[in-house]
């Protein structure tokens, strides 16, 4: 029988140090791997792990680092489990630190109520981390503004280092949007909830996810969605450059999916062949088709 978690806030954090406070296990990553199935179509380059091992300390910031501060009003709520306790802490700003090449190093949260030390969030992976919006976004509904990274992350606050899964709950969509753009170093130019997506070669790709279109610094446009219906080794984010779309069939009506004919420029696109996308909202489907018509030339 699973044990329920007790809820804790700022007044209970940090926990008293233990003999193993700075030791974390090198746990197996969840099946929700966030690697791209092709080379990332936008900068920054793949970010090296901030920690050489899960128990090591973060490197000092370099004078060549680029730091972008995202002020938050209202504050963001960060949720995580530590020692079988669920913590929810609120912070009023996030510093996104990248190295000279633009690769993400770590997130630094500050302005927490009663918190004397910064809250550092780094990534135990060499892959580019993708903020995962946990529920499909609908055009006329505020929806959930809860983001996670699906895999276990490394956290440091003061002298305490541990691994956990974190989620960020924003109260304002513009804050949630800017956070995604700063982490991905791209503009989020389109987002919509989709009921399902299927490919000719791989079958069902996903259900109840978000489809995003990102524009990188070079102007390159890329479709991004999480293939949660694929088997373990393929359960990851899929990127499709708009330049790899050969043709678009908008469907005869809103009950029919949009069908993309894909060029076999990458292995996963050669496997997929075509992609059928059923949107949750009819207006989102029309907007997606119109966006492709205006930008895929």
Image (cartoon, rainbow, N blue to C red):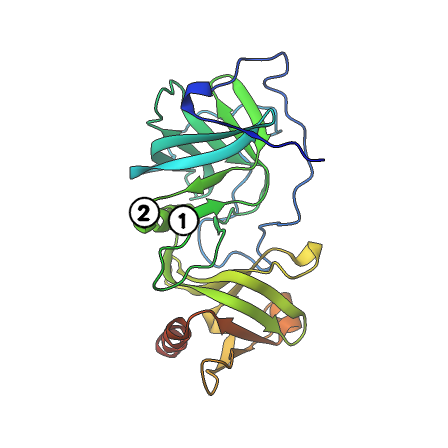
Residue 22 position in % (x across, y down):
59, 19
Quadrant location of the C terminus in the rendered image? bottom left
Q: Kindly identify the residue that appears in the image at 41 percent across and 39 percent down.
A: 100
Residue 296 visible, this orientation: no
Crowd rating for badge 1 (residues with CA inside 10 Å; few <14, some 14–19, many 20+): many
Sequence-wise first label, 2 or 1: 1
Instruction: Please state which of residues 109 and 184 is positioned toward the viewer in this rendering.
Output: 109
Residue 199 position in % (x across, y down):
62, 73
Q: How many marks?
A: 2
Image side of residue 166 versus residue 202, left or right: left
Q: Is residue 117 above or below residue 51?
A: above
| Marks 2/1: CA–CA distance | 8 Å
- Furthest toward the bottom, the residue is 252
Quadrant location of the N terminus in the rendered image? top right
Q: Kindly identify the residue that appears in the image at 52 percent across and 56 percent down.
A: 40
Instruction: Please state which of residues 148 and 267 is positioned toward the viewer in this rendering.
Output: 148
**SS class, disc 2:** loop
Residue 71 position in % (x across, y down):
29, 37
Q: Kindly identify the residue that appears in the image at 60 percent across and 27 percent down.
A: 84
Residue 264 visible, this orientation: yes
The answer to whether mark 2 and mark 1 are in CB contact below 8 A is yes
Residue 133 position in % (x across, y down):
47, 52
Instruction: Please state which of residues 176 and 283 is positioned toward the viewer in this rendering.
Output: 283
Q: Is residue 237 above or below residue 124?
A: below
Residue 199 is marked as none
**SS class, disc 1:** loop
Residue 145 is marked as 1
Image side of residue 172 versus residue 234, left or right: left
Crowd rating for badge 2 (residues with CA inside 10 Å; few <14, some 14–19, many 20+): some
Residue on which the image places disc 2: 172
């Amino acid at each position: 029988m699973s044990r329920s978690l007790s809820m804790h806030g700022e007044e209970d954090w940090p926990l008293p140090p233990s003999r193993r406070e700075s030791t974390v296990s090198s746990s197996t990553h969840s099946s929700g791997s966030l690697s791209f199935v092709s080379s990332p179509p936008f900068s920054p380059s793949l970010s090296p792990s901030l920690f050489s091992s899960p128990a090591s300390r973060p490197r000092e910031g370099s004078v060549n680092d680029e730091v972008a501060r995202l002020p938050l009003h209202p504050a963001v709520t960060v949720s995580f489990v530590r020692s079988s306790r669920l913590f929810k802490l609120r912070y009023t700003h996030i510093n996104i630190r990248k190295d000279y090449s633009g690769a993400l190093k770590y997130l630094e949260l500050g302005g927490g109520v009663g918190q004397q030390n910064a809250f550092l969030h780094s990534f135990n992976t060499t892959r580019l981390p993708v903020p995962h919006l946990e529920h499909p976004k609908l055009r006329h509904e505020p929806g959930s503004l809860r983001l996670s990274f699906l895999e276990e992350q490394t956290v440091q606050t003061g002298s305490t280092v541990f691994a956990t899964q974190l989620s960020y709950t924003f109260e304002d969509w513009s804050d949630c949007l800017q956070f995604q753009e700063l982490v991905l170093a791209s503009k989020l130019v389109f987002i919509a909830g989709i009921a399902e997506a299927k490919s000719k070669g791989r079958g069902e790709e996903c259900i109840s996810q978000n489809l995003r279109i990102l524009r990188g610094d070079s102007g390159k446009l890329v479709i991004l969605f999480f293939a949660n219906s694929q088997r373990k080794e393929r359960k990851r984010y899929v990127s499709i450059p708009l330049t790899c779309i050969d043709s678009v069939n908008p469907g005869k009506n809103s009950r029919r999916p949009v069908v993309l004919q894909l060029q076999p420029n990458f292995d996963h696109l050669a496997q997929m062949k075509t992609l059928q996308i059923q949107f949750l909202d009819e207006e989102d489907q029309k907007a997606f088709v119109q966006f492709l018509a205006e930008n895929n030339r």
